[in-house]
Structures are given as C-alpha cells and as structure tokens.
Image (cartoon, helix red, strand yellow):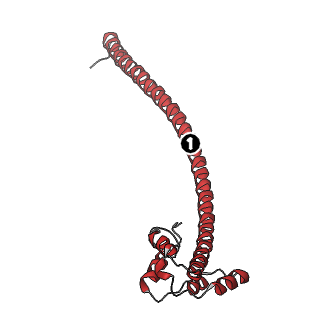
C-alpha cells in the first residue's frame, strides 16, 4: 500500500470531518452544561434568599416565644400572688364567720328569727369558708378568736381549732374548702 496525495487528502478530510463533529459536540455540550450551571446558580441564589428569610422568621418567632415565656412567668407570679391573697381572705372570712356565729349564739333569740335566717342561708358547699348553722353549737368562743387575731397566728391549725366541731360532715365540708396550689410548672 502506497501513500498517495489523494489517499492523504481523503484521510485529512475525513479526520477534519470527525474533528468538526467532535468540536460541534463539545460546543453543544458546553452550551448545555453552561445553561445547567446557570440554572443551578439561580436556584442556589433563590435558596440563599429563602434560607435568609427563614432564619429571619425563626429569630422573630424565637423573640416572640421569649416574650410569651416572660408574659407567662408574669401571669404565673400574679396568680401565685392572688392565690396567697385569696388564702388570706379565706382565713379572715372564716374568723369573721366564726365570730359572727358566736355572737349570734350569744344574743338571745326569742322569736328564732336569727336561727331561721342562718338556716335559710347558702349551703356550706356553695360558699368558700362559710360556717354553717350545723357548726354553731360547739364553738369555743370569741376569746380564742381575739387571742388568735392579737397574736397574729392565723395559720390553718389555729383556724381548725377555732372552728372544730364534733360533727364529721361539717369538718369534711370545711376540709374541701381549703385552697391548694393549682398551677403546675
């Protein structure tokens, strides 16, 4: 086999055609990859914006949650304070009711109107700390109430000793009226 100009020209032209095809394929591939990379860059920029917005919203929500937490703490402190005030009011009301009941037992009731009025009053289960007519017979007297008030000893034990009664149902009613902590953290 001899190399001739014609064979060499055919080989070169064939090689040029293959190189042009490869060059065209590379250019098309380059365009395609460039478009895809630009699309990914656009999506990446969008994701950065979205993640920035999400981060801002999360920080705003955290701030709001911290404010809510602070507000709940404040409300909880107010409720605890009100619970203490209610307990104090209940104790004072119980002392007052015991004193009034004792005074009603001391005052002579010829017509029985005071006793009727007290019996027509609300039931002990309907009012907090109410000393009902069933407890009127066994009070120790006004002297103990005055001593407790003067000594400042207004605890539950002293209150129960002032309002003690042999009737178990009235003790059960009074026990049901004691306040307990109702908020759990």
Whether residue 16 sits left or right of residue 90 in the image: it is: left
| Residue 161 vertical placement versus 101 (above, below) | below
In this view of the protein, which residue sits in the foreground, 180 or 103?
103
Whether residue 9 sits left or right of residue 86 in the image: it is: left
| Residue 30 vertical placement versus 149 (above, below) | above
In this view of the protein, which residue sits in the foreground, 84 or 152?
152
Which residue corresponds to the image point at 56% horizontal and 42% vertical from the top-left?
Answer: 55
| Residue 170 vertical placement versus 48 (above, below) | below
Whether residue 4 sits left or right of residue 148 in the image: it is: left
Residue 29, image x and y in percent? 40, 24
Name the residue carrying label 1. 55
For this orientation, the residue located farthest to the right is: 150
| Residue 177 vertical placement versus 50 (above, below) | below
**Quadrant of res 103:** bottom right
For this orientation, the residue located farthest to the left is: 1
Residue 22, image x and y in percent? 37, 21
User: Callout 1 environment at 10 Å: few (<14), some (14 to 19), or many (20+)?
Assistant: few
């Amino acid at each position: 086999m001899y190399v001739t100009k014609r064979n060499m020209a055919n080989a070169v032209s064939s090689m040029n055609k293959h190189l042009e095809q490869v060059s065209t394929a590379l250019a098309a591939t380059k365009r395609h990859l460039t478009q895809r990379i630009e699309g990914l860059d656009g999506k990446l920029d969008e994701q950065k914006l979205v993640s920035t917005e999400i981060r801002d919203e999360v920080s705003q929500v955290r701030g709001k949650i911290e404010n809510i937490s602070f507000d709940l703490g404040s409300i909880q402190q107010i409720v605890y304070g009100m619970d203490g005030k209610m307990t104090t009011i209940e104790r004072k009301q119980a002392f007052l009711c015991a004193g009034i009941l004792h005074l009603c037992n001391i005052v002579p009731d010829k017509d029985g109107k005071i006793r009727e009025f007290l019996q027509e009053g609300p039931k002990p289960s309907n009012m907090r700390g109410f000393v009902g007519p069933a407890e009127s017979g066994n009070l120790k007297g006004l002297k103990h109430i005055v001593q407790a008030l003067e000594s400042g000893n207004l605890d539950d034990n002293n209150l129960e000793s002032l309002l003690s009664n042999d009737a178990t149902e009235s003790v059960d009613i009074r026990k049901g009226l004691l306040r307990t902590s109702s908020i759990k953290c």
